[in-house]
Image (cartoon, rainbow, N blue to C red):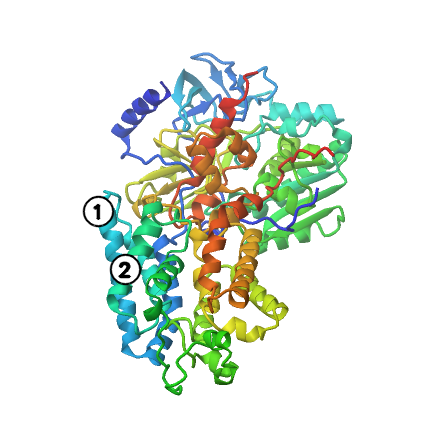
Amino acid sequence: MSFSQKTLKGAKVGHFKNTENCPSTAMPIPAEVCISMSQHLGPPCKPTVAKGDLVKVGTVIGDSDAFLSAPVHSSVSGTVKDITEIVTANGARSQVVIITTDGEQTVDENVKPPVVENHPDFVKAIRASGLVGLGGAGFPTHIKLNPRNLSEVDTLVVNAAECEPYITSDYRTIIERPQDILDGIAAIKKYLAITQVKIAVENNKPQAIELLRRMTADDSSIEVVSLRAIYPKGAEKVTTFETTGRMIKDGQLPADVGVIVNNITSVAFIGQYMRTGMPLVTKCLTVDGGAIAEPKNVIAPIGTRYKDVVAFCGGYKCPPKKLLMGGPMMGIAVFSDEYPVLKNNNALLALDESQTVVYPENPCIRCGRCLHACPFQLMPRAIEMAADNHNVDRLKKLNVMLCMECGCCSYVCPAKRNLTFTNKMAKQQVRASMPKK
Amino acid sequence: MATNVTNQAQNTAAETTPKLMITPSPHVKDSITTQDIMFTVLVGLFPALLAAVWYFGMRALIVTLVSVIACIAFEWLFNMVVKKDQTVKDLSAMVTGVILAFNLPSTIPLWMVVVGAFIAIVVVKCLFGGIGTNFANPAATARIFMLVSFATPMTTWTAPRGVDASATATPLSLIASGETDKLPSLMQMFIGQRGGSMGETCAIAIILGGAFLLYKGIISWHIPVSMLASVFVFALLFGENPLYAILSGGVMIGAFFMATDYSTSPVTDTGKIVFGIGIGFLTMVIRSFCSYPEGCSFAILLMNILVPHIDSLTMTKPFGAIFEQKKG
């Protein structure tokens, strides 16, 4: 399990944490929400309500029998207006439940603190809460908390690196809800028999580190690890390696090296959920970018359309050129501000003209910057050439499947080559060559 | 079909909101461009140019200008003739022009400079695909071509300013001919008071420029350090003064500005060290055992040929990759 270097490389990306001092504020309930059935990694949920049904805050409106899934709850009280389809940011179709709100925000009578006595109860409760990884990937949390090798898992890594530029929603969670975080950690420690906890924070958030260290001073099992703020310290494999020294190999899950990794906002949610029983119905997201009049951290009901979120932030101060779901390094460009807030949304960025300059691609000059920026020491240029030649054997030899598409190679390339995108396409080539299951 | 769906959605979206751009992530990029890198290299070459003009007069400047203009013109013409996108604005041709000029004596007839530029840019660079794809160092190859073709003008040296006019031979040719009593002192070597090609003589100017490139992150330490160390060690082994070996001939400019050429050097750190050691070794072998007094450009060219092999033998071991155990 050795690796030649102690810390992984990355790119020195500007932080732009403009909103770090903006307290998260709840936005007014919009007239209509559009709740997607596809809010997690895995097969989408099926709607469990019909047109015309009355729903309350916390009512289950979608669920699935699939292993990799989490239920979806209504974030508002109101009437189901329609069940329809939208095209998601990645071009696939997804079912959505459109709810006309009544403004009352009546809470569903089933919402009550979960009764948890042991590990299976805990996993069941977390599934019922609809929690998915709030850091961005949207992996259903109850599956993470229920590893096959439970007895071998000894470490909880709480990921608060928040390495993406602009985003400060996790930082606000730390500053505003430290007790929820501690409660969440305590719950996971208790039911999973965790012996050590590492909270990973990038060193560009000294106040958060100081606060967490103060709050955990009397608990020797919890260590707040300050990471050098070089993107992407928040990537799961990177965070795990830098906090525990354990390397998650190709095809492994963190649990395979005895680690559970959870985003800090997910952990805070667990703490809050154990107390209140309110499922995941709101999400704090950083709204920023050159086209936003008043950048801030907004607590939005899940399913709020982006245009309503933007309106709460003073609207656009100039025509937006690009709307990003997530941060600028890994976020997805969406084609409309009709698109709804998802559970794993941590930012909404509206970029203006100057932030969306498209550079022409120039020939590679073999400077090696991509190779030296890659946290996993992949060779993006070599992958690009192999992908151009459709040489799948070479792609496999170059371990392209390890690429997590963090964007460092594209970021540093002086010839402005879209290496990350090429890697993504190269992974497609390798997948296509594999025998279908 | 998925594309159609997206298009439809885009059309409906366009009615309500201004058209939004869809691009793959990442959505931010570092501001550095190829042009910036080449400009920085030019800045790094500037101290050596000043030294060349100081020691060899305005003629040095004229040779440099002719070389640069010829290189840019050849690249521009080539791209025009073969209908390729113009690449002259990336400044790489300018860098080649300056380095080529630095490899020539200041007295060289100007038409020969133009021939050298043709070899460097058209034959070595553009015919092999242009920037980033040429396997041989353009300046080093052009120098060798000129050395073989124009042997006398390429080895006729004038004395630099401040040096006795009779001491016009290069230190290496003095060593080769056994006239060691006429050799300049180490200090003179360091500040450039010796015969030689106009840009290679002043070690301090080259080190200054090289340090600037290292500081700017344009080159890494691996090639210069391994190459200089290798020259030092092999000079010791072959019974020569190691410091003298480093300061003479084209070793200094080779280590900082020629061997570090991106296109013709390995991309991995280990590969760069292997490459540097190889150049140092070959340089000393040629100097000590061959009929040419100087071998740095030959060494660079020979190692250029090995770069693809060095690259594939020093491929990185990615984080988390699973390697098949060799059964033995």
- At horizontal 39% and vertical 80% (from top left) the residue drawn is B168
- State the residue in front, A63 or A309: A63
Q: Which residue is mark 2?
A: B115
| Residue A407 spot, x, y in % from top left | 47, 42
Is A239 placed above or below B49 here? above
Q: How many marks?
A: 2
Q: Which residue is mark 1?
A: B80
SS at circle 2: helix
- Secondary element at tag 1: helix
Chain ID at mark 2: B
Tell me the residue at 59%/51% (across/down): A208
| Chain letter of the residue carrying label 1 | B
Q: Earlier in the sequence, mark 2 or mark 1?
A: 1
The amino acid on which the numbered mark 2 sits, given as a three-letter code, is Val
Relative horizontal placement of residue A398, taking residue A144 as reference (left or right): left
Q: Which of B326 and B160 lies nearest the eye of the viewer?
A: B160
Per the model, the C-alpha gap separating discs 2 and 1 is: 19 Å
Quarter in which the C terminus of chain B is drawn: top right
Q: Is residue A393 visible?
A: yes
Question: What x and y, as percent, mark residue A255?
Answer: 69, 33
Q: Nearer the viewer, residue A187 or A202?
A: A202
Quarter of the view holding residue B277: bottom right
Say few, some or many: other residues with alpha carbon within 10 Å of mark 2 (under 14 / 14 to 19 / 20 or more). some
Three-letter amino acid code at the position of disc 1:
Met
B153 in relation to A132, above or below: below
Image quadrant where one finds the N terminus of chain B: top left
Mark in the foreground, 2 or 1: 2
Q: Which residue is located at x 53 percent, y 37 percent?
A: A404
Circle 1 residues within 10 Å: few <14, some 14–19, many ≥20:
few
Q: Is residue A173 visible?
A: no
